Image (cartoon, rainbow, N blue to C red):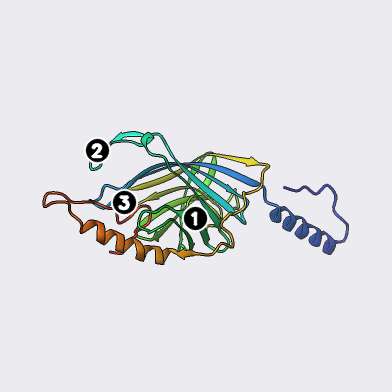
Amino acid sequence: MFSIKKLNSNPILNFILIVLLINTSFSQNETLEVDYSSVLLDEIDDYGSFNFFDGKLITNGVKSVYSITIKDTIVDTEYFGYIDSSKFKFKNSFYKDPLRNQVIYYREKRGLERPKLIKDNYTIDWKLVDEYTSVLGFRCQKATCNFRGRSYEAFFTSELPYNDGPYKFDGLPGLILKVKSLDGALEIKATLVTNVEEDVPNNPYDGLEHTISFEDYKKLYKKYFNNMTGYRVDMDSEIFVPNRYIEFLIDE
């Protein structure tokens, strides 16, 4: 932030000084570190999925990285039964350019012949709602959208003027602190916001070739889905493969 102790007597020079100070302030945004708790439990039908993640967003408003790791969770679900996520080992990082609505991330082999990098360009058509709440002490406004198979409501705060948020949720005039799907399958909520001195880590995938688009990945996953769901060891067995995680991978 900035402060003005004494202004010049010339009003035009004062105006120029204030504009320069404001531009300098917002061109040198501090780096924020935001911790999120994430639950995906989609039991709507046989083709849902589950994940329990701890997420961490490091952002300066221009570039960011969102990293996720499995959260130790024990829960008894209606469809999946008893889940002990401590048995799973998984982590991934999403390197984001929120100003260009672009993210690059590493995708494990499932649905692919080999692991690949996915470069995803996306736009979320948010609708602002005149409704407010408090998250971690920040005044947040509600916004809604439909994004890749699900309807969402999100709460963002303009008190943190970063066009960013968890996972691929960004594009609002402030930092997104909470996201919830209206089908009840997904909820992501910030648990801590802190300033850090370190810069956002560089994207190790930047400039690498052999990336595929999200749409091309969906085509590969559809082949995998059809092959696996059509495969049976015997007449009494059937393999269930998700057709969606956070995003729907098989269009309905």
Give how far apart the Cα atoms at labels 3 and 2 are.
20 Å
**Residue 250 seen from this side:** no
Q: How dense is the environment of label 2, judged by Cα within 10 Å: few (below 14), some, or many (20 and up)? A: few
Residue drawn at the location 58% of the way across and 61% of the way down: 99
Q: In this view, does 202 lie above or below 56?
A: below
Q: Which mark is residue 105?
A: 1
Residue drawn at the location 83% of the way across and 47% of the way down: 5
> 181 or 210, which lies in front?
210
Q: Mark 3 points at which residue?
A: 183
Element at label 1: strand
Q: Residue furthest right?
A: 9
Three-letter amino acid code at the position of disc 3: Asp
Q: Mark 2 points at which residue?
A: 81
Q: Which residue lies furthest to the left in this view?
A: 235
Q: Quadrant of residue 148?
A: bottom left
Badges 1 and 3: C-beta atoms under 8 Å apart?
no
